[in-house]
Image: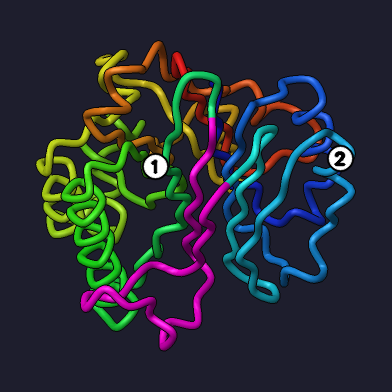
């Protein structure tokens, strides 16, 4: 099972980019972020014509996530549960979707997310980011307690350490690289999850985002903020995790590129 996460930065703006990607690269499962579309306005033909089942959790003009699968998806839920276990209906930002994908030899619960950016920090946006990460940690704990094989993937808006930025010092006071952000990230990892890319590649210089400004792509001035976190049961099935960096150099690119996970499921 090949699963890809991709922040498309607007599904309508990236229509042809995503269409050719689904056709040519053909992930078994795709988890999209920043679709920037309400559910009713999502161009369903884009994914259904390519043979995918589609589930969205959208919002007009901002945020939004989608789960695409070539095999059936069961038990879809939308919205990150609140700390009391109920879905947080007070959170009007469409940032989280879950569904169980059935593979050839097993099933995996896929948690697709678009974690808040948090800037400017400090401030209410950063408070929201940290609170959201606390809720994500609680959700991971609950899934582990249920012994559900699961993975969490998407745009985490977290630079885990200095290896994950071309210019680490430039991000030290940014919400993506603040010590509190990295501490919250480590708390989630330390539940026993595997950060898939780092389980295969330790070197610096691998990025998943290059800003549109200041020639960042040509300078390779990037950061790595798109991740896969795997429960132990899923980590046992991991073959590889790679970044499709060449997508950033194509016509009408997103500022993010897909990250791929290969599982023997």
The residue positioned 84% from the left and 43% from the top of the image is 48
> Where is residue 149 drawn, in percent x and y?
32, 36
Q: Nearer the viewer, residue 254 or 29?
A: 29
**Label 1 element class:** loop
Q: Which residue range is magenta in the image? A: 74-102
> Where is residue 115 drawn, in percent x and y?
40, 59
Quarter of image, res 201: top left
Looking at the rendered image, the quarter that the N terminus falls into is: top right
Residue 75 drawn in magenta = yes
> Where is residue 41 drawn, in percent x and y?
82, 68
In this image, 22 relative to 156: left or right?
A: right
Estimate the spatial distance between the alpha carbons at disc 1 and disc 2, rounded to whole Å.
24 Å
**Label 2 element class:** helix
Checking the image for residue 16, the label placed there is 2
In this image, 44 relative to 157: left or right?
A: right
Residue 101 drawn in magenta = yes
Disc on the earlier residue, 1 or 2: 2
Q: Nearer the viewer, residue 16 or 118?
A: 16
Q: How is the image coloured?
A: rainbow
Vertical placement of residue 188 versus 166, above or below = below
Q: Nearer the viewer, residue 40 or 186?
A: 40
Q: Mark 1 points at which residue?
A: 225
What residue occupies the far bottom of the structure in this picture?
A: 90
In this image, 170 relative to 18: left or right?
A: left
- Marks 1/2 in contact by CB < 8 Å: the verdict is no
Quarter of image, res 11: bottom right
Checking the image for residue 90, the label placed there is none
The residue positioned 56% from the left and 23% from the top of the image is 245
| Label 1 Cα crowd, 10 Å radius (few <14 / some 14-19 / many 20+) | many
């Amino acid at each position: 099972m090949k699963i890809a996460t991709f922040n498309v930065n607007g599904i309508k703006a990236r229509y042809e980019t995503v269409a050719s990607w689904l056709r040519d690269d053909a992930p078994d499962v795709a988890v999209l972020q920043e679709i920037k579309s309400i559910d009713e306005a999502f161009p369903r033909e884009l994914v259904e014509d390519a043979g995918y089942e589609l589930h969205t959790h959208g919002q007009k003009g901002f945020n939004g996530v989608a789960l695409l699968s070539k095999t059936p998806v069961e038990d879809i839920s939308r919205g990150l549960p609140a700390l009391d276990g109920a879905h947080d209906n007070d959170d009007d930002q469409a940032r989280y979707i879950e569904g169980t994908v059935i593979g050839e030899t097993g099933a995996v619960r896929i948690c697709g997310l678009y974690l808040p950016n948090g800037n400017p920090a400090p401030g209410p946006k950063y408070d929201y980011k940290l609170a959201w990460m606390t809720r994500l940690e609680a959700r991971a704990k609950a899934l582990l307690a249920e012994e559900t094989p699961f993975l969490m993937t998407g745009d985490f808006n977290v630079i885990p350490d200095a290896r994950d930025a071309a210019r680490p010092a430039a991000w030290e006071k940014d919400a993506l690289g603040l010590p509190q952000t990295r501490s919250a990230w480590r708390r989630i990892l330390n539940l026993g999850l595997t950060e898939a890319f780092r389980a295969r590649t330790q070197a610096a210089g691998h990025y998943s985002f290059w800003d549109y400004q200041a020639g960042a792509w040509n300078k390779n001035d990037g950061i790595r903020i798109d991740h896969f976190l795997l429960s132990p049961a899923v980590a046992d099935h991991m073959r590889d995790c790679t970044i499709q960096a060449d997508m950033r150099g194509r016509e009408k690119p997103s500022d993010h590129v897909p990250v791929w996970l290969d599982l023997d499921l």
